[in-house]
Image: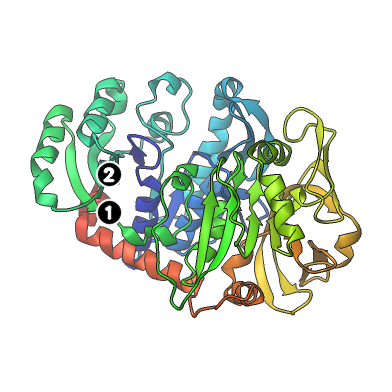
């Protein structure tokens, strides 16, 4: 089990790389995360949902994503409350304090999923959540040491040197851990190192001296990780790595970042297009008047995010952009925002509420308790360009503009809506831009220059590169021996 000194230290990435590395050695590897907190999720083949990171790890391991890989998923809907997903399905909602009392009930589901996966795997690679040193949450823990103790699982601790203070991160974790928990730790890894690793040799010795744990390696910063979908919203705080347009002026796509943004990995394929400049705008930043497209991504709390949009003044900017003939595209929650109204009479997202939308599409949304979770494929209604992706939403959107749908599914059903002038469009389908043909069509329809960039091929290339990177800098035979 790989636990971290904190969030965003690279646990997800290391597990994904090790899944691919051990798979290349001929082992049947399965990823597992007992409890996750993320609004980036994926739909499994059996119609459930798991954290996006576990779907990527499954891909690295050559497996289809399964609900058993992430039996408990928390999807934050407010500062203190989350929707709770258990075994891929909505279990309910709870505030943070209430969730602590639910953990003993959820342990059985966690262990059942672990047993199901481990029965068919040669090697289980398990990812902890947040920090191993959150001793205030240790009672009834199912995410870190509580799970490790129940499963009898050896632990490797990961520290992040890029954020500074890695010696204190790891030594401090040993200091606060219960002795029985600390005894499970077989060693530590220092991740995200930049520069000459020999300069940290004494640091590794110091950590080992203060903890009694073995140093298992220093992993240099892996720059190509920017191509892989991120799980943690902390990734939005990191500045994007700039890339020069391949030819002339890039297409500019502006994305207002709202508090409850969800499935923002939908944007990754666009961010990595060589002729696209993707601007992730924080509140207080005005919408650029010369942008080619305003893109509204998914939201875990559409009504709350619409209120935040108005507080930031972006609703005024977006409507002005549309009046000038600008293009606006909405994904899932962003699609719901484009309509006249969003109603939540049952309090699906929180307290019962209703709000006016942007009014750019002649549609309205009614929030419903039933959640749509399905993988889909088909073609765009107007141009006939193929697509594939998945639906993951609560609510139904209907109205006059749905008569001109954006997409036609393989089974004949339609999705989305397009304004009469074709400038405003929305869809419930996530992963829409992963499809190279669909992304090429969008870029060219906006007057931009498409490229030969293939998103899926790039993901595979990066996973192979990550596996080779870890083979070089970690002793995989030693790690395997620690797993017994």
Disc 2 is placed on an element classified as: helix
First in residue order: circle 1 vs circle 2: 2
Model colouring: rainbow
Tags 1 and 2 in contact by the CB under 8 Å rule?
Answer: yes
Residue at 61% from the left image edge and 56% from the top image edge: 44
Q: Residues within 10 Å of mark 2 (few under 14, many from 20)?
A: some
Where residue 233 appears, as percent x and y from the top left, is 50, 43
Write down the quadrant of residue 402 in the picture. bottom right
Locate residue 393, reporting x and y percent: 72, 49
Q: Is residue 53 above or below residue 466?
A: above
- On the image, numbered disc 1 is attached to which residue? 221
Q: Callout 1: few (<14), some (14-19), or many (20+) C-alpha neighbours within 10 Å? A: some
Residue at 67%, 43% (x, y): give it: 89
Q: Is residue 338 left or right of residue 110?
A: right
In the figure, residue 91 lies in which quadrant?
A: top right
Q: Residue at x 51, y 48 (%)?
A: 69
Position of residue 16 relative to residue 308, above or below, is: below
Q: Which mark, by number, is residue 163? A: none
What residue would you read off at disc 2?
A: 162
CA separation in Å, label 1 and label 2:
8 Å
Vertical comparison of 237 with 213: above or below = below
The N terminus appears in which quarter of the rendering?
top left
Q: Is residue 373 visible?
A: no
Q: Which one is nearer the viewer's eye here, 298 or 58?
A: 298
Residue at 24 percent of width and 38 percent of height: 186
Provide the secondary structure element on which disc 1 rests. Answer: loop
Left or right, 118 with respect to 448, comes to left
Quick one: 303 or 377, which is closer to the camera? Answer: 303
Residue nearest the observer in this picture, 177 or 333:
333
Q: Pinpoint residue 273: horizontal percent, then vertical percent.
A: 49, 69
Q: How far across and how far down the image is residue 232, in percent?
A: 48, 44
State left or right for residue 140 relative to residue 160.
right
């Amino acid at each position: 089990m790989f636990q971290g000194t904190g969030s965003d230290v690279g646990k997800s990435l290391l597990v994904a790389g090790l899944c691919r590395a051990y798979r290349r050695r001929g082992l049947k590897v399965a990823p597992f995360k007992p409890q996750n907190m993320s609004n980036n999720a994926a739909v499994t083949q059996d119609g459930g949902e798991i954290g996006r990171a576990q779907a990527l790890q499954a891909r690295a391991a050559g497996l289809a994503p399964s609900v058993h890989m992430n039996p408990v998923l928390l999807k934050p809907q407010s500062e203190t409350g989350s929707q709770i997903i258990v075994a891929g399905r909505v279990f309910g909602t709870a505030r943070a304090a209430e969730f602590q009392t639910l953990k003993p009930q959820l342990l059985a589901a966690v262990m059942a999923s672990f047993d199901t996966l481990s029965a068919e795997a040669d090697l289980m690679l398990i990812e902890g959540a947040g920090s191993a040193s959150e001793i205030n949450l240790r009672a009834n823990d199912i995410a870190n040491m509580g799970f490790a103790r129940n499963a009898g699982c050896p632990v490797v601790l990961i520290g992040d040197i890029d954020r500074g203070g890695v010696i204190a991160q790891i030594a401090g974790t040993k200091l606060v851990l219960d002795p029985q928990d600390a005894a499970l730790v077989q060693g530590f890894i220092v991740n995200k190192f930049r520069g000459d690793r020999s300069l940290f040799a004494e640091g590794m010795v110091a950590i080992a001296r203060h903890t009694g744990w073995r140093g298992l390696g220093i992993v240099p910063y892996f720059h190509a990780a920017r191509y892989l979908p991120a799980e943690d919203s902390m990734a939005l705080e990191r500045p994007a790595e700039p890339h020069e347009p391949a030819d002339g002026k890039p297409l500019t796509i502006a994305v207002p970042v709202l508090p409850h943004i969800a499935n923002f990995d939908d944007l990754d394929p666009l961010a990595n297009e060589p002729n696209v400049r993707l601007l992730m705008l924080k509140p207080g930043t005005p919408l650029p008047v010369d942008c080619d497209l305003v893109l509204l991504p998914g939201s875990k709390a559409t009504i709350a995010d619409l209120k935040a949009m108005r507080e930031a003044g972006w609703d005024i900017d977006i409507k002005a952009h549309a009046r000038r003939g600008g293009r606006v595209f909405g994904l899932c929650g962003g699609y719901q925002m484009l309509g006249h109204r969003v109603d939540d009479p049952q309090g699906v997202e929180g307290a019962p509420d209703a709000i006016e939308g942007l009014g750019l599409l002649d549609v309205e949304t009614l929030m419903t308790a039933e959640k749509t979770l399905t993988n889909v494929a088909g073609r765009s209604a107007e141009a006939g360009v193929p697509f594939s992706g998945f639906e993951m939403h609560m609510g139904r959107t209907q109205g006059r503009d749905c008569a001109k749908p954006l997409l036609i599914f393989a089974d004949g059903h339609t999705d989305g809506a397009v304004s009469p002038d074709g400038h405003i469009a929305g869809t419930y389908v996530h992963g829409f831009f992963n499809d190279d043909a669909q992304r090429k069509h969008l870029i060219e329809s906006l007057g931009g220059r498409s490229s030969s960039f293939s998103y899926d091929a790039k993901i595979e290339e990066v996973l192979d590169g990550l596996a080779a990177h870890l083979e070089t800098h970690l002793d995989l035979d030693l790690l395997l021996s620690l797993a017994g």
